[in-house]
Each structure stands twice: as structure tokens, then as C-alpha cells.
Image: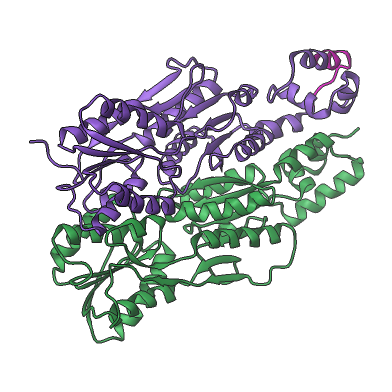
Chain colours: A purple, B green
Amino acid sequence: MATIKDVAKHSGVSVATVSRVLNGKGYVHEDTRKKVERSIQQLEYSPNEVARSLYKKESRLIGLLLPDITNPFFPQLARGVEDEIQRNGYHLLSGNSDEKTEKEIAYIQTFMQHNVVGLISASNHVARDYYNGIEIPKVFLDRCEEGLYCVYSDGFEGGRMAAEEILKRGSRNITLLKGPANVKPAQERFQGALDILASSSVDFHVVNTPSFSFEYAKERAYELFSTYPDSDGIIASNDITAAAVLHEALRLGKKIPEEVQIIGYDDIPQSSLLFPALSTIRQPTYDMGVAAAKMLLQKIRKQSVVEQHVKMPVTFMERNTTRKVK
Amino acid sequence: MATIKDVAKHSGVSVATVSRVLNGKGYVHEDTRKKVERSIQQLEYSPNEVARSLYKKESRLIGLLLPDITNPFFPQLARGVEDEIQRNGYHLLSGNSDEKTEKEIAYIQTFMQHNVVGLISASNHVARDYYNGIEIPKVFLDRCEEGLYCVYSDGFEGGRMAAEEILKRGSRNITLLKGPANVKPAQERFQGALDILASSSVDFHVVNTPSFSFEYAKERAYELFSTYPDSDGIIASNDITAAAVLHEALRLGKKIPEEVQIIGYDDIPQSSLLFPALSTIRQPTYDMGVAAAKMLLQKIRKQSVVEQHVKMPVTFMERNTTRKVK
């Protein structure tokens, strides 16, 4: 009786390659696949059922790649994904890339080694080609590009909304925080706000904020008010940054929102507990996670996916760091 | 040549049981194990190497059970675990139990099906017997009991510390929030604070707070000040609850810390961004995750574990919701 080793020897490939062909998972070049399939026929190889069932057992795993779970936006996103796949009998293998290419690739390789049947990535540092080489269903979350399957919220619109709301409420010397250059959703909201401010008649400053970490946000908020003491409106790149700006403004004795208005982005749960409670642009974070999981499950089950790009709406959460419209 | 099915038939057990015996993983009764081993010898069965290597591939997975990743304390804990096991070539399979027995058991079963080589649990709703039946290395994180391997911080001491610091700073009408009854670490810190208050000469109230959710914390903070308007010191059961109390106190126009002092618990990253910045009892959260991962890896590698209970120190983070000691 032929073994998988015999097939590998006969077709001149590794056992792992034969295994990938048998299970229809992982990348195998088309020519190699044909060669292996011919050897299987010629040797009348019948794959070991235990090995197959071991593989099958694994096929309830889904890989989830996040940039950093300690930013409260991502645990919300992850809960949406987890709750939905759990309801469907799947489970999460997860990792944090810290937006670093090396860690991102290492995690994707790990996911593949553990035979995940699908991949959701909310990280974006890797060359498009790398993902193209992965032959399992994949959905991108919180970021999108032409040709990919993705769920995200409308960053440009969110940025425009933030700028429009702060202008409408009378700020005339606005500081716009740019957010990390390598984080695509941050750059979209930045561009949206920039468009509105550039076509308005108010003065504004753009301040680079290359990190979303708590420590960094604190330092940057301190610098902001030293450099632009006359700012009467601040559009932050996310709620953590906004919280740091609010803290610093209050420390300096500024009246919020009378003297300075602040708008955040994300609406993490903590934002309504700040005092004054933070006005912010709300992403439907948990629902985005659910939607990405639903799309991935459709792809895994080879059901048709009606919308390849699901763009979810953002809303302005009017709280107390912005003034009321007269 | 005998197959694994022949062995299963010969010994009168399932293929899955034979598989568990071969791989030395998962629960198999000692009598069954002996029966299977005899059959293997008699039939001269030699396990399929691919099946073995498939199993071996899986043996880099570690299961992590958390109560709820949307409470910012747990992502910090999870990052500590993840970073440490990642450095050692292992990966996380994770799940949120929401402190519900049913979900907890379902996740543990899933972990076992995916052949995790170790388990870290920061959830505690399951009968001790259930965990005893799991024959892989396991470490409990953030909670502990006699006979278990665990990493936690000193909750009684943390609770005592919170009460002592608020007394030392002059509060004389203290409200102590009890925290969820089913969350053991919350009850330890509650007991610690209660001991100190009970042996002091000040008036105090105990208020039940059966949930740590953001929404609930907001409602409860509102009720707190309606019921006990004269409270001049509040010991919260965690930082989320403390943030809600602070928000409500400021909304009512109370001067913090002059009229009301507030102490939180955990020191989540957000707490230093509140205004006034929250005084709190700090747990070394990330380091606790790292320590639990190290202990588990020692057990997986069959190295001796010197300390079965690692109790880590807590510290008082003096910020601006408490007065300075004269």
C-alpha cells in the first residue's frame, strides 16, 4: 500500500506539499499540484483517514490579526468577530502585529501552519503581494483596497464630519492632529478633515502624531498647547489622543468647551466617562467585527458575497467637549 | 499492516482515544491507556508519521481564557502572555468567557480539540473538578486557590492599601464599592478594604456593584451620590467604576479631591488621562501575564517550577483624586 511518503518521492516534492494538495489548503503551484495528483493516481494512494480527520478538526480555526489589543478600539472589534464566529462553531487564533511587517508575516505563517480556514486582518503593513499568495478566504477589517474583500467605516466622511462640526460650533483657530502615517484609517480621517479645513476661511495647524500610545499622547498634548497656545478647536486622530488633549487643556485651566472645543475619533467605551464627556466621531466598531466575520464565513462556505466592500456609516456623538449649535 | 482503526477495534475504544494515547495528550483513563498500549504491541502497529507530525505541528498552541477583553485590564494581561509565549515560539488560541460557566467549558473543550499544549485561565466560574480533569499543564492568572499553579497580585493588600490611603488623607464618610460577587479578585480587594474600615473609627457604607460594564458603572455612580450625598471618600472596585464615579462627582459640581476623594483599582492606561488623573492601586498587569506564561512554559518543558503561587506586589499610584498627606 502506497504511503504519503511514496507519493512525495514519486512526484519529487516534500510530504508537506503532498499534504497541502490533499487538503486543498496552503499555496501549491499549479504544475506541482498536477504532478502530485498524477502520482496519487498512479500509485493508487488512499490518504490515511486519521490524518485527514486531524486536518478536518483543525478546520474550525480563523486567524485574526490586530495591530495592538491595548488600544481599546481593537478589543471591541475583536469581540464582534469572536462572538459571530463562535455562534457559527469557529474559533479565533489571534495575534498583535504592532503594525510591524515582520510580526505580521510571522503571524500569518503561524496561522497557515495551524491550518486556519480563513483570515481577518486589521493590520496593513504587508505588501499586497504577500496576502495575494495566501489561498484561503481573507477579509480585511478597518482598512480596504480595490480588489480586496473588506469591512471598514467611512474615514473620509468621519474626518469631514469632525471638521464641519467644529467649524459649525465656532472654532476659528483649529489644530488638526495627523495620526500615524503608516495607519491607513488614521490618514483617511485626516484627509477628510483637511479637505474641509482647507476650503474654509479659518486658520489651522497640522500636528504630526506618529504614535497612538498612551505615553506618547500625553507628551504630544503638552507640546501642542506650548506651540499653539491660541488653538480654540482640536480635531484629534483618535479618542486616546483626544483624552490626552482634554487632560492637558484642563490642567492649563482652559474652559472646555467655552474656550477650546475637542473632537475625538472612534467612540471607545471610556470616552463617555471622561469629564466633560468627549464629543467624538463614532465608528460602529463591534458591528464592523460582526460584519467582517459574516463576510468571511460566507466565503468559507463558498456562498456568494453580495458586497465586496462593506463601508459602514460613522456618526457624530455630540457630548460636552463641543459647544451647542445656536 | 495494522492501521489505527485496527488498534481501536482490537482494544474496543474509539480512534480518537487511540490517538490521545499515541500523543500522550488529552484525558484517557489509566486502564484504557494500558489496553490500547497492549493492542499496539500485539498488532505491531506503527503510527502514521504524517498523522504524528500533524499533531506535532499543533503542539505550539496555548489556550488563554479571559473573562472579557473589552475591560481594558485584560488586554494588558493578554499582551504580557502573548509577547512571552511568542518569544518562545508558541501562539495563542483565545476566548472570552464573560464569567459564564457554559462559555468557559465550551472554550476549554475547543482548546483541547485543537490540542493546545497548555492552558492559562483568568476566568473562574467553573467547578475545580472540571479543570482537574484536564491533563495538560495549566496556570491560573489573576486568581488562585490552594493546590493550583497561579500568578496573581495581592488583592487583600491592595484593598487594605486603598482604605489606609484614603483614611490617612482625611476622608471620614467613606463609600466602599463591593464589585461583582462572582469575581474573586474583586472580592479579595473588597475584603481587604473592609477589614481596615471595620477596625477604624469612621462611618462607611458598602454599595453592591454587580457588574464591571461601562453602562452599569454610569448608572451606579448616579445612584451612589443620590443615596449617600455626604460621602467624602469613595473606594471603587476597579478603574472603570472609579472613572464613572469621578464623572458623576464632577457633574454634580463636587471639588475633587477637596470635597471627595476617589481611589480606583488596576491602573489601566486610561486612568492617568482622566482629569483629575485617577489615584489608584496599581496591579503589575503586563508583568503578571509574562509571569504566567513563563510558569506555563516551565511546566510544558517539564522544568521544575520553584514557586507554585506567584503573588505580585501592588502599589498606590498617588495622582490627583486624593489629597496630599500633610
Quadrant of the image occupied by residue A51: top right
- Tell me the residue at 39%/65% (across/down): B186
Pick the front one: B200 or A129: A129
Quarter holding the C terminus of chain A is top left
Residue A170 picture location, percent across and down: 15, 37
**Is residue A216 shown left or right of residue A61?**
left
**Is residue A253 shown left or right of residue A101?**
left
Residue positioned most to the left: A326
Q: Is residue A283 visible to us here?
A: yes
- Tell me the residue at 69%/68% (across/down): B305
- Tell me the residue at 52%/59% (across/down): B286
Quarter holding the N terminus of chain A is top right
**Is residue A255 shown left or right of residue A12?**
left
Pick the front one: A175 or B30: A175
Residue B89 picture location, percent across and down: 69, 48
- Tell me, yes or no, whether the highlighted magenta stretch contains residue A45: yes
Residue B189 picture location, percent across and down: 39, 71
Residue A230 picture location, percent across and down: 22, 46
Q: Is residue B210 visible to us here?
A: no
The answer to whether residue A80 is above or below residue A296 is: below
The answer to whether residue B127 is above or below residue B260 is: above
Residue range highlighted in magenta: A37-47
- Tell me, yes or no, whether the highlighted magenta stretch contains residue B208: no
The answer to whether residue B51 is above or below residue A223 is: above
